[in-house]
Image: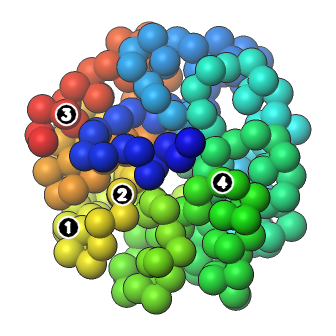
């Protein structure tokens, strides 16, 4: 079963655990699931590619065993190849890497797919869509970062709407958007072609079920 491969034209919500209460991570995910979330966005940071540090494969494995939703790992790390086997083992369904720091992207994407996961690329705000043009046959989803990776709660970068539109002219690969996604910005991104709405602070700032539902509905209404 492939998550992104079976998405069709649907617009879905994915809570980013970065803004959740880590002391009750599984329950936080279940709260967002009650609001209609279909995927967990699991942010991995290494204090090298980004200045922040989060969690790794051990936490992903515990979470995968505790919740029903599939887990998408976003590796904001300098050396993803070192971690990919452990995340596959942990039971995540998909893994995205940052092509800005991957030397042999074709090989890295192949490593993810060979482990039975779907392979994604996450683009920094100033990374052009053309960077991944020759990787597209090996990509199952594209994450358009609409903030600089590293922290939750940053301001949405408005030029990223046009970037989503541009990517959708290049490819049918599903586009995920990540950073500053709210009830206000989700419709702009969906109208441009985004289908997976990642939201951290906007979901966990209040009741996660209510906030997740509002974002999904706002996004779906723009279709
Ligand atoms: C940022 C992460 C995001 C982050 C988004 O580096 O990739 O997933 O959690 O947070 P919000 O939704 O608060 O912008
Ligand atoms: Zn992310």
Would residue 123 appear left or right of 111 to someone viewing this image?
Answer: left
Residue 220's label in the rendered image is: 3
Sort mark 3 into few (<14), some (14-19) or many (20+) by Cα contacts within 10 Å: some
Query: Is the residue 40 above or below the residue 72 in the image?
Result: above
Whole-percent x and y of residue 186?
25, 41
- Residue 126 lies in quadrant: bottom left
> Which is more N-terminal, label 4 or label 1?
4
Secondary structure at numbered mark 3? helix
> Which is more N-terminal, label 3 or label 1?
1
Whole-percent x and y of residue 156?
33, 52
Who's the residue at 14% across and 51% down the image?
A: 191
Tell whether circle 4 marks a residue whose Cβ is less than 8 angstroms from ligand 2. no
Q: Which residue is mark 2?
A: 175
Q: Which residue is mark 4?
A: 117
Q: Nearer the viewer, mark 1 or mark 4?
A: 4
Whole-percent x and y of residue 15?
49, 32
Of residue 36 and residue 101, the one placed in the foreground of this image is: 36
């Amino acid at each position: 079963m492939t998550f992104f491969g079976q998405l069709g034209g649907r617009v879905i919500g994915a809570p980013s655990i970065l803004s959740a209460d880590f002391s009750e991570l599984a329950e936080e995910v279940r709260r967002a699931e009650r609001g209609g979330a279909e995927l967990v966005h699991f942010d991995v940071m290494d204090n090298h590619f980004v200045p922040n540090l989060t969690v790794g494969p051990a936490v992903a494995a515990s979470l995968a065993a505790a919740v029903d939703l599939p887990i998408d790992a976003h590796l904001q790390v300098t050396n993803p190849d070192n971690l990919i086997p452990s995340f596959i083992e942990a039971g995540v369904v998909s893994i995205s890497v940052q092509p800005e720091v991957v030397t042999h992207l074709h090989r890295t994407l192949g490593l993810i797919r060979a482990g039975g996961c779907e392979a994604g690329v996450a683009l920094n705000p100033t990374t052009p869509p053309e960077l991944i043009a020759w990787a597209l046959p090996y990509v199952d989803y594209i994450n358009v970062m609409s903030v600089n990776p590293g922290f939750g709660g940053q301001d949405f970068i408005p030029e990223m709407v046009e970037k989503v539109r541009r990517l959708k002219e290049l490819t049918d690969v599903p586009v995920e958007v990540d950073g500053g996604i709210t009830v206000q910005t989700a419709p702009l991104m969906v109208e441009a072609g985004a289908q997976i709405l990642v939201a951290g602070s906007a979901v966990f700032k209040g009741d996660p079920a209510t906030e997740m539902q509002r974002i999904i509905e706002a996004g779906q209404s723009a279709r």
